[in-house]
Image (tube, helix red, strand yellow):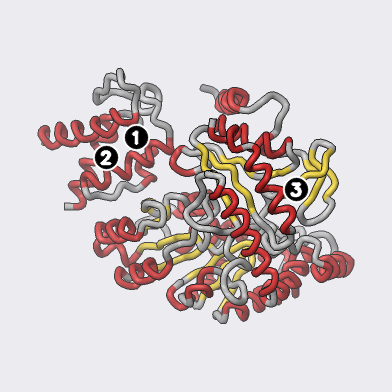
Amino acid sequence: MASDYEDVLQKLCHHLRQLSPSDADITPRTDLIEQLAIDSVKLLNLVMEIEDEFDISVPINALADVQTVDELTNLILRIRSEAR
Amino acid sequence: MSLLDKLDAVAAARKALLPEGMDVFGIPVGQIHSTTEAEIGGRRILFLGTNNYLGLTFAPECLKAAHEALDAEGTGTTGSRMASGSYGGHRALEREFAEFYGVLSCIVFTTGYQANLATISCLAGAGDVILIDADSHASIYDGCRLSGAEIIRFRHNDMADLDKRLRRLGERSRSTLIVAEGIYSMLGDRAALADMVRLKDAYGSVLLLDEAHSLGVLGATGQGLVEETGLIEGVDFITGTFSKSLGGIGGYCISNHPQLDQLRYVSRPYIFTASPSPATIASTRAALRLLRDGTTLREQLWSNAHRLYSRLHELGYRLGPEPSPIVAAILDTPQQALALWSGLLQHGIYVNLMLPPAAPDGKSLVRCSVSAAHTRDQMDFAGRVFAELRATAMS
């Protein structure tokens, strides 16, 4: 499970770096809005990229509870495991 | 952050972007001179930002019908259909809309926004899925939220992307509502309806098409994209508005599914809103007759649309993917869009300004809406002003 988490986290950070300031330090505890300035529209577009990466669909309702990189990683893991 | 602090943050963001004293998103309009001209800031301005596609807001038939209804039935119904009853005009307009489309039934709503809210929130519920185009109108997003269903976006008008998302749903695709728009309000492009109908049939889903911007605009009798494509049988529910081509205010949903009528008993936006006023219903009925017979109006509308789109394209403006009565110039930054919008107003033209997050993909739009009532001279005038402001828009 830990390796799954690391794998998803690494891929997610790759996408986040493309939307964030170049010097941004991204960790699981990083706040998407406060620290990376990912607004609601950027988040929705990011989700579309992630969906293709993991071949899942993320309902936008589920994003209401997502604030940090860790929470987004766990959401992806949960949806991926339900889809299998 | 307190409740009111959130609104202070909105005020600060607005102040940072918009010039002091300029109410871009609620411009004060003075005397209305005609369907295409009004006073703004004490000057006569060309209206190129309304959705008066067929130019019917001053049609004598509509004015006469509204005046008569006002005198006969009063200013309002003062309650919902459930509380105050269904007036003769409400029932007649529903029959006329159903007959216009050749379908079983129609429900009329007080606004177009409410038509989507009421219909979508009742068709899908908890445990169901709604697949919506990424560029969907706010009324579609809000209807989805009210439904409690899972909401999944597909890339704008990308049918391979829709296919992929339906496949991922597996058996759940059979309890999925797909929502699209006949003409999309931001860039004026049409839905890829043939592929969408094929997909919804293949996956056993239900399809709702919002014809808000295409009613009166597309098809021989103005039904919308369903008529232009001959695909009305493939669409389960059609919603639309009276506030664009019909020149009034209100909305509708039509369907061949007999279950549509049950919305009257479960749809909170329908049950708990006052019904449309008699004058509104009367002018809409008159406008619907003009719309059906409006071949010449549609020809004028499309001639104007092609003329403006071609001119802006020649000038090097980035536009939506196809000519349409919605001609939207795409700008990279809100500042560029604001400069173009302000320049147009200073030159005597009012258009719509769309900034993120309302505009798609983080871009900003200066959106023109063309009318059948615009003259060729007015279109050429707009072309000259856009030419003069090209450098402003690109800097």
- The residue positioned 75% from the left and 64% from the top of the image is B56
| Callout 3 and callout 1 share a chain | no
Could you say where residue B152 lies in the image, as x and y percent from the top left? 36, 51
Q: Which mark is residue B62?
A: none
Count residues near mark 2 (Cα–Cα under 10 Å), then give few for <14, some for 14-19, many for 20+: some
Q: Are marks 3 and 2 in contact (CB under 8 Å)?
A: no
Q: Are marks 2 and 1 in contact (CB under 8 Å)?
A: yes
Residue B333, compared with residue B8, is above or below; it is below
Between discs 2 and 1, the one toward the N terminus: 1
Q: How many marks?
A: 3
Q: Which mark is residue B46?
A: 3
Q: In this rendering, does residue A21 appear at all?
A: yes
Q: Identify the secondary structure beneath mark 3.
A: strand
Residue type for callout 2: Leu
* Foreground pick, B111 / A43: A43
Disc 3 versus disc 1: distance between alpha carbons? 46 Å
- The residue positioned 59% from the left and 42% from the top of the image is B366
Q: Chain of mark 3?
A: B
Could you say where residue B334 lies in the image, as x and y percent from the top left? 54, 32
| Res. B108 image quadrant | bottom right
Q: Identify the secondary structure beneath mark 1.
A: loop
Q: Identify the secondary structure beneath mark 2.
A: helix
- The residue positioned 29% from the left and 62% from the top of the image is B172
Left or right relative to B232: residue A45: left
Q: Which mark is residue A75?
A: 2
Disc 3 versus disc 2: distance between alpha carbons? 51 Å
- The residue positioned 76% from the left and 54% from the top of the image is B36
* Foreground pick, B315 / A15: B315
Q: Chain of mark 2?
A: A
- Name the residue that disc number 1 marks: A66
Could you say where residue A1 lies in the image, as x and y percent from the top left? 11, 36
Give the quadrant of the C terminus of chain B: top right
